[in-house]
Image (cartoon, rainbow, N blue to C red):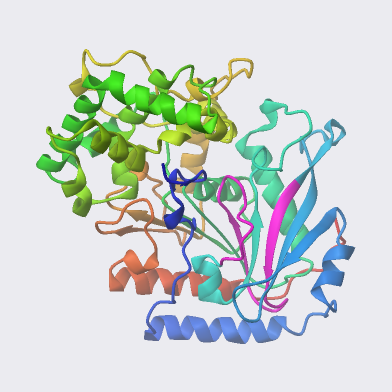
Amino acid sequence: MRTWNRRLLIPVAMTGVLALTAAAPATPETTAATTAVAAATARAADSPSRGDILDTLRAMPGLRVIEERPAQDPGYRFFVLGLRQPVDHTRPSAGTFEQRLTLLHKSADRPTVLFTTGYVVPLTPRRTEPTALLDGNQIGVEHRFFGTSRPATADWSRQTIRQAADDHHRVVQLFKKLYRGAWISTGGSKGGMASVYHRRFHPDDVDGTVVYSAPNNVDDRDDSAYLRFFDTVGTRSCREALGAVQRQLLLRREELVARYEAWAESTGATFGILGSADKAFETAVLRVPLMFWQNRGAADCATVPGPDATAEELYAWLDTTAALPVYADPVAEFYIPYFYQLGTQLGYGAVPTAHLTGLLRYPDAIDPRNFVPRDIPMRFDARAMPDIDRWVREDGDRLLFLNGAQDPVVAEPFRPGTRDSHIYWAPDANHHARLPDLTPEDRSKATATILRWAARGQGPVDDRDWL
């Protein structure tokens, strides 16, 4: 089996939540915005210098410099940091934990991009699209309860969108003493969701937010948008081929599960969280259309195994498409915080099952509750997502959403209002849509918007005491 990137359930070859890409071609609109950023940056350069960045970081309260690593891009320095955060921002006496951060430092007079994957923070110095576009600094934030960013004793009731938003707020307030110019936040998928939630509770922290491929599950009881997507995406022949291969996989369950169990035994993997290799296998099969359209496209329909495929071919295709290691304990344990959030606030979509009648053994196999140990209590907050949705539609300001038109994850998308917020759809793109995937016109508009926000934010910043 191949190695899988646990953040997005995609092959390591496709890593990078936000890919580094060249800026859009120059147009009168983007050229004017770029000039404004440069002029505002020059004004921000008049702010007091704090000397060497390493000395500055070491002097910041609550911040620990873990290490400095080589930066890939010329002119940058890359640091791995730890910031002491409250476990509960409403009750400081509840204790603290150290949140992992990264910093790509260019210059105190450049714009700053705050980004999160919504999971662990990558420890490799890679710029996001907005960072590359603005030639700015970049602060990466690991989401609470992921990686090393968790309390010694996990109180899961503190894994909420508001607590994470408050984490981001403290990061911004601390680093704004160093980076006094424009701030743009960004994230992809779950990271994009976290960026939106941060803005909901702290709308003035940044000058704009660029959100990639973020779902908006307003009502977790209504999954009709997802089912309509799977009924219409691609061609009928491709949809039928995916349904047929799902049936073949389940009809040949015994021999394929035996292969799965043999892999688990050879690697020492177990299935304690989901319960068995059989249930894990069925879960992977159910997720086939979701994972296929999320990471692939129409050109890959020809690779779907036909009715004469061997067991080896079926197994290899399922592994490549639906990431079989994800459902075994070594990876499933990593995703407990994610599924906890899905099952308590974020909600989850649905996949079609009518064509699999008589072949399924586990009702609600993809329900988030199945991915969280039973000793962790879960109670769904049905108010959380409608509140976010209302804010985006009615009060959200300076939000830019970029989605792939063939991405099932955004079958139910955010719909921003008119307060300088925008949504762009990349034709034929999947979950990994980026600026170059937009039409030339939309790419130019989106790029100009980001540059304009950055120019807007390069004004003076009030002096504040360190936190």
- Name the spot of residue 317 as percent of width and height, x first: 28, 40
Q: Residue at x 69, y 31 (%)?
A: 158
Residue 466 occupies quadrant? bottom right
Q: Is residue 129 above or below residue 314?
A: below
In the image, is 169 to the left or to the right of 26? right
Tell which of 101 and 258 is nearer to you: 258
State left or right for residue 456 relative to residue 359: right
Residue at 70% over, 45% down: 166
Question: Quarter of the image containing the C terminus?
Answer: bottom right
Q: Nearer the viewer, residue 71 or 251?
A: 251
Q: Quadrant of the N terminus?
A: top left
State the image coordinates of residue 124 (x, y, percent, origin top left).
61, 61
Q: Residue at x 57, y 66 (%)?
A: 126
Residue drawn at (57%, 46%) of the image? 118
Is 444 included in the stretch rendered in magenta? no
Q: Which residues are magenta?
A: 99-126
